Amino acid sequence: MPHPIKRAIAAGAMTLATASVMAAAPKPTIVLVHGAFAGSSSWNGVVAELSQQGYPVIAAANPLRGVASDGAYVAALARSVNGPVVLVGHSYGGAVISAAASGQANVKALVFVAAFAPDQGESALALTGKFPGSTLPPALAAPVKLDDGGEDLYVQQDKFPQQFAADVPLAQAQAMAATQRPIKAAALSEAAPAPAWKTLPSWSIHGTADLNIPPQAMAFMAERAKARKAVVVAGGSHALMVSRPREVAALIVDAARPVTVDAGR
């Protein structure tokens, strides 16, 4: 049986070796995908946190037109990255990253931030209605009619701060309301393709005060996806990436660490 001192030395050497690999290995690129009624700038706080820790970051401009087409757009962006990628999705963006990652060899992990993680055939709308708690429908503005017969959806600006970002400073939430990106209504009822979370490791974070997606629904999806880590933020709104960038970034780093080690082997 190995001597305790020898075991301790061996364990210390292994820790140092792992740290050395992580220091030498290139860090994965973090691709952030916003959801409905938000934009790429909603990730600014998370970008700052990740950049300070040396991670290359891309905040994608999600078209918000449909799960399949948005997924193809993000997949193309991921393919353009030289090296491993961690995909992070907020809200509807969770459905997009799960579609985008399928068949993408360089996508190594998924992080769901107050996000949908639909199974094949499920839609964001169906998952929202599966559990009680969403007050989004009455907060929506009258749809904008599109030339192709579709409709764009916005949140009423006066209701946006409470509905979407209750734990964000009011002036900032009002600015988010004015700059929100619309989602095509059909995207919320579009059936998801085979999900990448069945083959890739995933991480999850959501708030207990989310009024867009019921917290119970997000807990259900995280458990179903066998998330390696599921963080629940007490009092957190739907806009966690804005109100709690440090917590969100910490979870992304947790997801990126094994990717960094693998890349260095």
Image (cartoon, grey):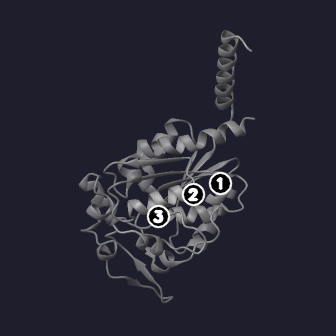
Q: Of tags 1 and 3, which is closer to the observer? A: 1
- Helix, strand, or loop for circle 3? loop
Residue 81 in percent (x, y) is at: 67, 52
Picture residue at 60% right of the left edge, 38% below the top: 257
User: Could you tell me the amino acid type at mark 1?
Assistant: Leu
**Can residue 89 be seen from the camera position used here?**
no
Picture residue at 53% right of the left edge, 63% below the top: 117
User: Could you tell me the amino acid type at mark 2?
Assistant: Ala
Q: Of tags 3 and 2, which is closer to the observer? A: 2
Residue 150 in percent (x, y) is at: 47, 85
Residue 263 in percent (x, y) is at: 71, 39
Q: Nearer the viewer, residue 256 or 233?
A: 233
Image quadrant where residue 139 sits: bottom left
C-alpha distance separating marks 1 and 2:
9 Å
Q: Earlier in the sequence, mark 1 or mark 2?
A: 1
User: Could you tell me the amino acid type at mark 3?
Assistant: Gly
Q: Which residue is mark 1?
A: 200
Q: Which residue is mark 3?
A: 35
- Helix, strand, or loop for circle 2? loop
Picture residue at 68% right of the left edge, 36% below the top: 261
**Can residue 249 be seen from the camera position used here?**
yes
Q: Quadrant of the C terminus?
A: top right
- Helix, strand, or loop for circle 1? loop
C-alpha distance separating marks 1 and 3:
21 Å
Q: Would you say the residues marked 1 and 2 are in contact, meaning their CB atoms lie under 8 Å apart?
A: no
Q: Which residue is mark 2?
A: 225
Q: Nearer the viewer, residue 177 or 133?
A: 133
Q: Quadrant of the N terminus?
A: top right
